[in-house]
Amino acid sequence: MKSTKIIYWITTGIICLFSLGAIQMNSKMAIEGSNHLLIPRYLALEVSIGQLIGLVLLIVPAIPKRFKEWAYVGYGIMYLTAFNAHLSVGDAIAPFGVMSLVFFALLVCSYVCFHKLHPERK
């Protein structure tokens, strides 16, 4: 149980630290990145705001389980969409595709540990 809790907080912490980059949603680099991936500006802003909301939902322990599960769904869709977007524009799989899949794996690990720590009540 203790190792599960440690793995949960490490994986969740890494995901949330990565999500802090969404604070720079109006930076020149963020705008160039979304243009490179052919993502409309309004969608890039929505994804950044969603990341910040998901960060709060995942990291605050007092948030109800249902909200945390929807945050996991949102992050999962975002990471898989990022993988697809990089492949669509012809980016190399090595740095970009692998990174989104690694974060997706961290997300799945965090999700599994979350459910081990908070089992369903019958």
Image (spheres, helix red, strand yellow):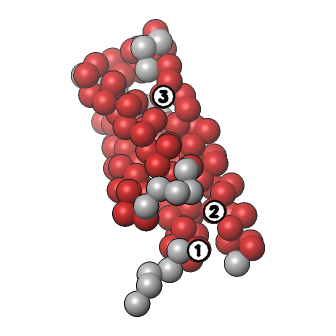
Question: Which residue ends up furthest to the front in the rendered image?
Answer: 62
Which residue is nearer to you in this view: 35 or 74?
74
Q: Are marks 2 and 3 in contact (CB under 8 Å)?
A: no
Above or below for 35 versus 73: above
In this rendering, which labeled residue sits more in front, label 1 or label 3?
A: 1
The amino acid type, in three-letter code, at marker 1 is: Leu
Task: Estimate how packed mark 3 is, as few (under 14), some (14 to 19) or many (20 or more) residues with alpha carbons within 10 Å.
Answer: many
**Which mark, by number, is residue 8?**
2
Give the residue at x 25% y 22%.
42
The amino acid type, in three-letter code, at marker 3 is: Ala
Q: Are marks 2 and 1 in contact (CB under 8 Å)?
A: yes
The amino acid type, in three-letter code, at marker 2 is: Tyr
**Which mark, by number, is residue 22?**
3
Give the residue at x 56% y 49%.
59
On the image, the x and y values in percent for residue 101 come to 49, 51
On the image, the x and y values in percent for residue 86 come to 39, 35
Q: CA distance from mark 2 to mark 1?
A: 9 Å
Ranked by sequence position, the earlier of labels 2 and 3 is: 2
Position of the N terminus, as image quadrant, is bottom right
Give the residue at x 40% y 30%.
48
Q: CA distance from mark 2 to mark 3?
A: 22 Å
Label 1 element class: helix
